[in-house]
Image (tube, helix red, strand yellow):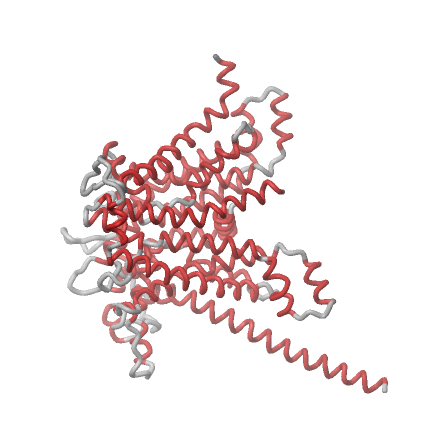
Amino acid sequence: MQDKVHTSYKQLEQRSKYTNMFLRWFLYLVLILFALYFIFPLYVMIVTSLKTMEEIRQGTLLTWPSGLNFDSWAVAWGGRGYGAGDTFLKPYFWNSIKMVVPAVFFSTFIGAMTGYVLTKWRFKGDQWVFLFLLFGCFIPFQAILLPMARTLGVLGISNSVIGLVLVHTVYGIPFTTLFFRNYYISVPTELVKAARIDGAGFFKIFFKILLPISAPIIVVTVIWQFTQIWNDFLFGSTFSFGEAAPIQVALNNMVLSSTSVKEYNVDMASAIIAGVPTLIVYVLAGKYFIRGLTSGAVKG
Amino acid sequence: MFKWLEKNLPKIVMAPAVGLIGWFVYGFVLWTLYISFTNSKILPKYELWGVGQYVKLWGSRKWLIAVDNLIIFTALFLIFCVVIGIILAIFLDQKIRAEGVLRTIYLYPMALSFIVTGTAWKWILNPTLGIQKMFIDWGFENFTFDWLVNREMAIYTIVIAGVWQSAGFVMALFLAGLRSVEDEIVKAAKIDGANLFTVYWKILLPMMRPVFFTSFVILVHISIKSYDLIVALTQGGPGISTTMPALYMTQTAFHKSQVGLSAASAMMMFMAVAAVIIPYLYSELRRENAR
């Protein structure tokens, strides 16, 4: 009797072991299939950029290139060397750098300051001020596009990198404020109070107490702003279309320009060049990227 | 004087941010609202003209197509992103080997711009050399996949690329949510004899209500604003079959020079976003105050 119970229990255990193993395999299968779906476009982009047009016509999307042929990369970056109609990414890549660096710096700095005041120098109605700024995260930019175009025109900085720096700084403030406010709110206010009793002023407290512990949130904010501004197309294409265009606009123009033969290899090389800076940041600092993504969107 | 300065320093530091947002966000929205009630063409005019632009807008076939597309896109984009996101999050939560690598793969599209994404998918989906040719070369001779150039189907190509870009994001939100649940709850349920499926379906997923809510708000927000992806993938075509409100707005303003009409469409988008965001902010703030 005892023995019988024992075996049936063992059988049961055995069976559940098999189901478990089956489930486990199924789990990995699904995860890997999805991984393939996500990696597929990147793979196609890379191999296509390394093929000649002849190879592209003969093979399929997945065909491995015959060799490491970086010709289309050179064309995408530096052009073919003839004059008119030769668009290539190099100048626009630098436009984007010139736009991103100051815009990220200013918006991060302003956000740090407002976040600091909103948590450590609270005043009556500061909740409302925060809400007032926060709403800026969500407005559809179409609702400010027309007046912005007029304003940049009046200021004489439409179609310039400076204009884009202004635009990106302003519309970055709600996000940077949100990041810093949510970070500083967890810093004990007692620290600040004690320093105030010791006679430290507004800026001294910021630079001596808060700034030294702000490294993580600065990284999160800088990555978030960098990715947003680098990837922006709406503002770039509306306010800056000529020489001063940022890289995403140039990429789109290159791909759409209807020359006689469509060169998919050059298109793909261009797309990779435009995507590589944010991709590198993501690979190197994925943890901070995700943190920005979740708290930037989730709020709090 | 010095004392006053010292006392009000925090407010002075706040002033630029509040001023900039006040002017560039609220002031500009009000300006757009005003212009939407005028008969502005190339240049803004300031005499009021009533609701004529809104009447014109809702009588325009192109706008109605744009709204239709937005509804189709939003529904599918939401469903696919949430379903794929949840599946991936739950599966990744099972003590998977190489979780970090898989997570990185699922989320990297979020680091790319919609223009880059659109360019890549346009090449993959193009009927002559893309995925269609791949299947034909593999021996499926009658395989056709021409959605990109097919009026009826082109909108779904935007869904494919959009889901590819954003599903990983939903996964990240749900994974963070699942990880924040105390182990004890799951253990207790298992002791009571619940299997894994029941644990997720009856206990964990219902606990994820705030995450569902957040995902919903963010995805709807992304879809109302979607512009770059359409520009890169279809330019609103074939014909006008994949126009969406954001594209309609910029085309009307900058190609057709109908500033008043364009402002009206921008205000419709603004109201749609506000209808989703205001309840969200309200509930978030209430939760924060309750803490």
**Image coordinates for residue B35, horizontal then vertical, percent:** 26, 39
Which corner quadrant of the image does residue A244 belong to?
top left
Q: Is A288 placed above or below A212 here?
A: below
Check the image and name the residue furthest to the right: A1
Q: Residue at x 23, y 56 (%)?
A: A254
Q: Is A26 placed above or below B210 here?
A: below
Q: Residue at x 39, y 47 (%)?
A: A228
B60 lies left or right of B28: left
**Image coordinates for residue A54, horizontal then vertical, percent:** 23, 71
Q: Specify whether residue B42 is in view.
A: yes
Q: Quadrant of the N terminus of chain A?
A: bottom right
- Of residue A169 and residue B200, the one placed in the foreground of this image is B200
- Of residue B170 and residue A279, the one placed in the foreground of this image is B170
Q: Specify whether residue A71 is in view.
A: no
**Image coordinates for residue A203, horizontal then vertical, percent:** 52, 25
Q: Is A99 placed above or below A124 here?
A: below
Check the image and name the residue furthest to the top: B1
- Of residue A245 and residue A70, the one placed in the foreground of this image is A245
**Image coordinates for residue B97, horizontal then vertical, percent:** 58, 66
A6 lies left or right of A37: right
B264 lies left or right of A288: left
Which corner quadrant of the image does residue A144 belong to?
top left
Q: Quadrant of the C terminus of chain A?
A: top right
Which corner quadrant of the image does residue A167 belong to?
top left
Q: Is A163 placed above or below A256 here?
A: above
